[in-house]
Image (cartoon, helix red, strand yellow):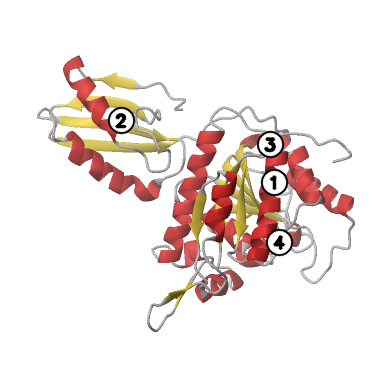
Amino acid sequence: MSQIAADYRLDGALLGPVLALLDAHIDPYLGRGLVSAGCVTSLAMQGDRLQLGLSYPYPCSGIQAETAGQLATALTRLPAIKSVDCEFSFVVPKTSADRQGTLARVAHIIAVASGKGGVGKSTTAVNLALALAVEGARVGILDADIYGPSIPLMLGIADFQPQSDDGVHMNPARAHGICAQSIGFIINEEQAAVWRGPMAAGALAQLINETAWPELDYLVVDMPPGTGDIQLTLSQKVAVSGAVVVTTPQDIALLDAKKGVNLFQKVNIPVLGIVENMSYHLCPACGHKEHPFGAHGGDKIAQRYGVPMLGALPLNIRIREGMDVGQPSVVAEPSGELAAIYREIARKVGAQLALSHSQSGVSISLSDDE
């Protein structure tokens, strides 16, 4: 999987045992040993100290310390090795996606979608983008909900007005370490976008192509709910690398989530996994866990379609309060439980993307009658 040539500078007697121990360490997100996954890029000895270089195809700064400790414990069992220095890097897998203009600077495009509104899709998209950035990636977010843009408010940049350096492309906003673009930066927040489907789709295409995107590992696209013109425009016009489907446990949301999964499968866009919002509620007084909207709905969809269950978020007032004031959970409480869940989801998304698109991105055009 690695696109970096390995540089092993160990004598033959030591190389075999070291590689065996490294491959016995199964990466929890790739499901492979580090050698088999192509993560081991360099090995060298300085006295009795092993210099180990690891390059991951997904951003994973949050697990590096734990991984280094586990590897050091295993490798120092070899008599020749007294200590281990681990150097981590992240290299996003390249694709053959044919993107034009400033989108050519984007390695992967991730659509975050839902079959219906009100399931926390935008909240998930924002926190996923921020979590990917905290894990070490260069990230942007595109608000593709032309009729109801919410990203400006959620990132705390509702007053941003795009400027252009070349008179053609708009510079995206920047907030919390990521860049962002939204129709909400262009039209007044109280102004309704009274556009038919083709007009909205055209506005989205213009927003995508006329933004001066910087070099990005991931562009997270917050999709509008449903399976209409905007979704089809994105699948036709942009090489989407994969999709994350957001749902809640109740039956009506699950029915619509299935439609979302089916849409992406129909246009040959890999579904990277399912995120279940409002999965459970913990009583702040006694800690009792209850499931007001049902239980295990996301798991059932994931099992039915053979896609990963990426994570489950609680029904927690702090998530809503943070979004309302432009302080999403990942940045408002970076060491908190909610941020940890989003970062876990981010690592899973990055790993799934690496596994399904290590060589190429996918774009497909639909016929007019579809």
User: Among all residues in the image, which is located at the extreme left?
Assistant: 79
- Which secondary structure lies at badge 1? helix
What is the crowding at mark 4: few (fewer than 14 residues within 10 Å), some, or many (at least 20)?
A: many
- The dot on residue 268 is 3
- Which secondary structure lies at badge 3? loop
- The dot on residue 122 is none
Q: Amino acid at mark 4?
A: Lys
- Which secondary structure lies at badge 2? helix
User: Which of marks 2 and 1 precedes in the sequence?
Assistant: 2
| Quadrant position of residue 114 | bottom right
Which residue is denoted by mark 4 in the rendering? 116
Whether residue 285 is situated above or below residue 197 in the rendered picture: below
Residue at 56 percent of width and 27 percent of height: 359
Q: Position of residue 189 (x, y in %)?
A: 76, 69
Which residue is denoted by mark 1 in the rendering? 262
Give the mark toward the camera: 1 or 3. Answer: 1
Asked if the residue under mark 2 is in contact with the one under mark 4, i.e. CB atoms within 8 Å, the reply is no
Give the mark toward the camera: 4 or 1. Answer: 1
| Quadrant position of residue 247 | bottom right
Q: Is residue 102 visible in this depiction of the protein?
A: yes
User: Which of marks 1 and 4 precedes in the sequence?
Assistant: 4
Asked if the residue under mark 3 is in contact with the one under mark 1, i.e. CB atoms within 8 Å, the reply is no
Q: How far is disc 3 from disc 2 in space, using C-alphas?
A: 33 Å
